[in-house]
Structure formats: C-alpha cells, structure tokens
C-alpha cells in the first residue's frame, strides 16, 4: 500500500529496527470466540485501546506488581511532549492539559499530545520513534477548554497497521504505525474533514472554538467511530449537531451517521418541541466510547444540548442528549437508548466511557453496562437490550422559576446502587467542624437558592452540587471483570450560578466560560469548603449485588493546612479529579492537579477488596491522564500523563526496582 510522504512527520534515527505492532486486534468479525481470546491474550502484555479493551474496563490481568512489592515502584523513564517546541516558538499560545492515556501494542506506545500531535514511543526506554504534527494549532484555539487531547486508536489488518487521530481542528487522520506518515488512500491523502463529511448540516470553519476532536476514536469490526467536541454555548444562531459517524478503517468511506439531534421524521424529533431541533445542536459524544464486538454494539455516552444550563430555546426532553445510546456498529442504527437527564439544565452530561462487564444478579447472568455520572449516580443496564438491572424511578423534581424555562417535571433516579456522591444542598451537608463553623455555614447558605438534586438555576444565585465537574467526570471508572467490582473516583464541591429570563446574567464572581452567566466555587466559613468532607473519594461497588463494598477519601487533602489542622480530621481528600487503574492484584489511584495546594504528587496502591492502602510512590507531578499498564521483556510498567497548563507535559513510566 502506498503511503503519502509528509514533511510534518519525523522518524528518529535508529528506530527502524524496533519491533512494530502486529495484527492482534484487526478482525472483520472480532466477536468470534477465537478472536475474543486473542484480544484477552494480548491484554496480558499490551494496552491496545484507551480503556485497555473496548469494554473500557481500565483493567489489566498483569500481576507482577502486587502488594508484596508495590512499595518498590520507581520512575523508569520520562518522556516530554514535543508540544514544548511549538510553545517555545509561539509563546502567545496558552498551554492546555496533558490528559492522554497512551495505548501500547507490541512494544510501542502511541499517544496524542495536547496540541493534537501524534507520537510513537519505545515502551522499553521512552525514546521517541516518530512524531507527526498535523499543525492543528495553526487554526486557533480549539475549544473553550484550550489545547488538550486524550488519545489515539490502533487498527491492523495483516501488515497494514494504522494509528487514527481526531484532531482539535476536526480532522480524522490515518497514519502508518511504523513511520507516522499518512495513509495515502485513506480519505483524501490520509485525512477526512469532519466538518464537512457526513454531518446533517456543515460546520463553519470559524470560530475555531466551535467544533473539534480531542478524544480517541473507537475501532471495532473495521469501523472507525468518531464523536466530537462542540462549544456548549449558543455562539451561532444555528448550532452544529453532535452527529456520530462510522468510517471504513481501510478507505475512510463514510458508512453511517447517527443523528444525536434527530432530523424531522426520525425517532426523538418530537422531543424537541417547537421545531427547536432545527436550530439547536450539541448532544455530541466528547467522552470515550465502548463496544461489545460480539453483540456488534457501540455504546455512546451523550452530552447536553446547546446551552448546557438554559433550555428556554429548546423546549422538550431533547433526545438524545444526556443519553446512553447503543448503536449497531456496522449500520449505525439505534438498538436502544436511555436518557439519564431530561432537558438538562446542570451540564450533567455523561462524561466517561461506560464500563462493560458480565455479572450475576440473583443467580441470573447479565451482560451489563455501567455508566457513571456527574451527579453521582451509577446507571446499570443489560447491555443487550437496555433494560435497567435495578429499577430506575421517575421522581418529581423542583421546577424552574424563570419565565422562559420549562424544566422537566421528573428525572430518572436509580434505586440501586446508591449514589456514590452526596447530592443536592441542605443544612445536613454543611461543614460542621465546630458549632460556630456550622452556624456560619448556615448564614452563608441562606444567601443562595438551593434544594435537592435537579434544583434548576434561578435569578438568585443557585447552588449546584455535585457541580458540572462531577461527581464522576472524564476520568471514569475501572471494573474488575473477574469479580464484577467497579471502582469509581469522584470529587465534591459546590458551585453557584444565576440566570435571567433570557438565560444570561453577569454577576460578581469568577466566570466559567463553559457556562452561561457567572459561575464559581462557593467557599464556606474562614475559607473552608461549604460542605463537610470527603472532598474526593474512591468508591468500590459490587455490581453483582449493587452494594457499596467500601468508600475512602482519596488522600489526606488539606489536613496539613492551618485552616484544617486544629480539627484532626484524618484523610478528607482534596478537591481534585483522577482516574483509577485496576490490575489482577491492586487498584492504583493518584491525585489530580486541580487542587495544587493540597493534592499530593503520588501514586497509591490499594487492596481491591478492602480499600486498605498498600503502598505510596512519590511522583514528579500530579496524575492527570488515566494511567495504563503493560509488560515489556517480562517487566510490568505503569504509565501516566502529567502536565497541567504551564506545568511540563510528560509521560512517566514506573516499574519495580
């Protein structure tokens, strides 16, 4: 096959002798038992997709690192992102976040950088093999979130081995895995313009923040499935739809498009009243996806409709926003869906890939899919048909006080498992280290509008808890396929927001540019949080029973802060987000950079059954991207991404001494 040369790719000298990926995961019908076994065997050494496998379990059966030696982990190598060269040459560019999780196949790591470069790295040494720069950054700031990316995808058929990258300026690029050069006969010279191909309405090239990609594509049955990121705010009179597309992995030909905002005549169109589907968009899939190749289904975690906290211009439930959607991987036809939030007014989109796991409930085997949410619910379904494993009740919720808003009268509430985060606002949640602190917290609370979960934002600043940052967020959950135990990380904070009847209001306080109006974290007495701890936590949930096995704060948090020290609280967690990694023997969780005063630069190993702390390894930075693990030359490695804005963007590999 002819490969197109590119001036934007460089191959490091001496790299040609490195063993390159094989064809383990390329199958026309990957659901066959022999092929499933091959995939499972590869996971014993490799990490071939963003979540380990397409089940998004974030699990590896590797067991060399266990409770007897986890305390001996040390840094084996570090790799610095080539974005440093771009930023050095263009100091006006604002660095983003290095949120990537590498994939690893046959001794090579593949990553995307925050500025949408792709790179191949020797998994033994951390040496760069090649870098491909699509120069996506030249088209301007890619989104309200700045420059960031979460990963690439790998596909192979015989000797044809490819890396797929969805860039921040909305291109799908196919690269030769050995050299990093574009595949000439994929799309047009190796690229597909995602703003033009297969959308129900074209996306304008400007503003550049409007539409792009920063998540890994999903590949199953030779289909490359691509979502995208869309600015949540109505910056144009007619907003881009969140259409999901399937492309042929060999040729780039469009095979199907699924309309997350239905067009006239399609199922769900009537849930956008007054023709609002014609002008509203979003409902896009920005989070990673999952797939069951045996069932032939891909699972999409849907985001909110245009204007994430105001729905006056989109009356109705707004399918398929905030929905878990199961599509036929080969045709794109909807097989089932479940809307987890009707007419979203809180930016409670589904933020992470759903976990696929087989469980046994009351003696009955179930092929399950578990979706963690920002609001602290875990939705669990039979993934073959979308039926809830445990009842989900539609319960009445508070209604909006805005004249132009028509909030949904009820919202889905899973009856089981119980929420893994506190929800809504009440005096019971207020910080109460002393009676005086509790009384001051009550006085602060009285300044705001508040209530149970799903209290809509009003004219008076309204408290939202959990906030739009979670609860759970893009870091997602891990699940052990052998036990059916799911591990979800979450964090807890309170934000405030106020809107006028037109959905806009500028009030005093910090502004979050992703949210209409003015929004910010609400502090409590003497600079303490408004609510009591834990401020971040890890929760283990047995999906066979729905029981919470254990919950613990993620780290000591601010216990050494002079404001907290007098109360001798023990671990309370810091207000940060991080991702779990499960192995045969341990659960690994770090601490994220979002609370730099209190979060620790460590990777911790926990006993999976009890939550007992087994070991703590110092790190050169906070964990940001979700960790992954692999084995090379018989040595297990754990790799994580660090790099928060101006902090250096790098991968760090840990191994045994």
Image (cartoon, rainbow, N blue to C red):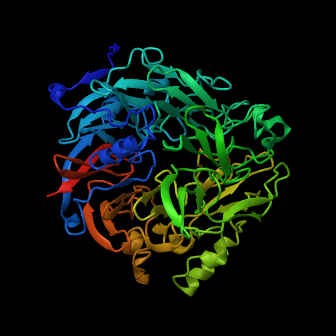
* Spot occupied by residue 653 in the image (x, y as percentages of width and height): 24, 49
* Spot occupied by residue 637 in the image (x, y as percentages of width and height): 24, 51
Give the residue drawn at x 51%, y 49%: 353
The quarter of the picture where the N terminus appears is top left
Give the residue drawn at x 58%, y 68%: 417
Q: Nearer the viewer, residue 80 or 473?
A: 473
* Spot occupied by residue 145 in the image (x, y as percentages of width and height): 51, 41
Residue situated furthest front in the rendering = 33
Q: Nearer the viewer, residue 644 or 527?
A: 644
Give the residue drawn at x 73%, y 46%: 504
Q: Quadrant of residue 13?
A: top left
Q: Nearer the viewer, residue 570 or 59?
A: 59
Q: Is residue 169 above or below residue 590?
A: above
Q: Nearer the viewer, residue 558 or 243?
A: 243
Give the residue drawn at x 41%, y 48%: 51
Q: Is residue 208 above or below residue 594?
A: above
Is residue 536 visible in this depiction of the protein?
no
Is residue 14 visible in this depiction of the protein?
yes
């Amino acid at each position: 096959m002819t490969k197109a040369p590119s001036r934007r790719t460089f191959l490091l000298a001496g790299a040609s002798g490195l063993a390159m990926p094989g064809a383990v995961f390329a199958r026309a019908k990957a659901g066959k038992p022999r092929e499933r076994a091959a995939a499972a065997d590869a996971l014993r050494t490799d990490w071939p997709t963003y979540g380990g496998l397409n089940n998004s379990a974030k699990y590896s059966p590797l067991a060399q690192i266990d409770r007897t030696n986890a305390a001996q982990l040390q840094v084996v190598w570090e790799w610095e992102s080539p974005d440093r060269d771009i930023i050095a040459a263009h100091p006006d560019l604002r660095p983003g976040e290095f949120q990537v999780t590498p994939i690893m196949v046959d001794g090579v790591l593949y990553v995307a950088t925050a500025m949408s470069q792709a790179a191949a790295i020797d998994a033994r040494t951390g040496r760069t093999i090649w870098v491909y720069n699509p120069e996506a950054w030249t088209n301007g700031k890619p989104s309200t979130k700045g420059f960031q990316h979460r990963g690439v995808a790998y596909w192979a058929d015989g000797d044809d081995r490819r890396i797929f990258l969805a860039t921040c300026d909305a291109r799908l690029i196919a690269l030769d895995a050995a050299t990093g050069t574009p595949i000439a006969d994929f799309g047009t010279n190796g690229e597909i313009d995602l703003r033009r191909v297969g959308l129900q309405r074209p996306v304008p090239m400007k503003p550049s923040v409007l539409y792009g990609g920063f998540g890994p594509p999903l590949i199953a049955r030779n289909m490359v499935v691509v979502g995208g990121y869309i600015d949540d705010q109505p910056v144009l009179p007619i907003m881009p739809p969140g259409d999901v597309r399937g492309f042929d992995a060999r040729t780039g030909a469009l095979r199907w498009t699924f309309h997350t905002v239905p067009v006239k005549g399609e199922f769900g169109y009537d849930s956008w009243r007054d023709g609002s589907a014609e002008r509203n968009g979003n409902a896009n899939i920005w989070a990673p996806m999952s797939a069951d190749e045996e069932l032939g289904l891909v699972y999409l975690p849907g985001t909110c409709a245009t204007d994430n906290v105001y729905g006056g211009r989109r009356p109705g439930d707004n399918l398929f926003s905030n929905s878990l959607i199961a599509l036929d991987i080969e045709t794109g036809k909807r097989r089932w869906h479940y809307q987890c939030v009707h007419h979203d007014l809180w930016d409670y989109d589904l933020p992470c890939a759903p976990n696929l796991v087989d469980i046994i409930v009351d003696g009955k085997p179930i092929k399950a899919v578990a979706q963690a949410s920002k609001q602290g619910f875990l939705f669990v379904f039979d993934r073959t048909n979308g039926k809830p494993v445990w009842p989900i009740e539609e319960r009445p919720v508070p209604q909006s006080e805005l004249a132009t808003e028509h909030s949904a009268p009820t919202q889905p509430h899973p009856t089981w498992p119980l929420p893994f985060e506190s929800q809504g606002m009440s005096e019971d949640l207020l910080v109460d280290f002393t009676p005086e602190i509790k009384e001051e917290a009550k006085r602060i609370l009285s300044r705001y509008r508040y209530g149970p979960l799903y209290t809509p934002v009003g004219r008076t600043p309204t408290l939202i808890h959990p906030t739009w940052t979670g609860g759970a967020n893009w870091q997602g959950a891990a699940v052990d396929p052998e036990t059916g135990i799911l591990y979800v990380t979450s964090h807890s904070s309170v934000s405030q927001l106020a809107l006028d009847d037109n959905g806009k209001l500028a009030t005093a306080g910090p502004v979050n540019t992703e949210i209409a109006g003015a929004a910010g974290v609400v502090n409590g007495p003497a600079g303490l949080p408004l609510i009591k701890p834990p401020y971040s936590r890890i929760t283990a949930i047995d999906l066979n029973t729905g029981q919470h096995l254990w919950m613990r704060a993620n780290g000591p948090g601010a216990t050494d802060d002079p404001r907290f020290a007098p109360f001798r609280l023990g671990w309370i967690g810091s207000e940060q987000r991080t991702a779990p990694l499960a192995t045969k023997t341990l659960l690994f969780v770090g601490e994220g950079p979002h609370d730099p005063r209190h979060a620790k630069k460590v990777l911790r190993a926990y006993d999976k059954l009890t939550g007992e702390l087994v070991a703590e390894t110092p790190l050169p930075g906070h964990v940001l991207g979700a960790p992954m693990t692999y084995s090379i030359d018989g040595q297990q490695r754990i790799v994580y991404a660090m790099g928060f804005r101006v902090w250096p963007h790098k991968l760090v590999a840990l191994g045994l001494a």
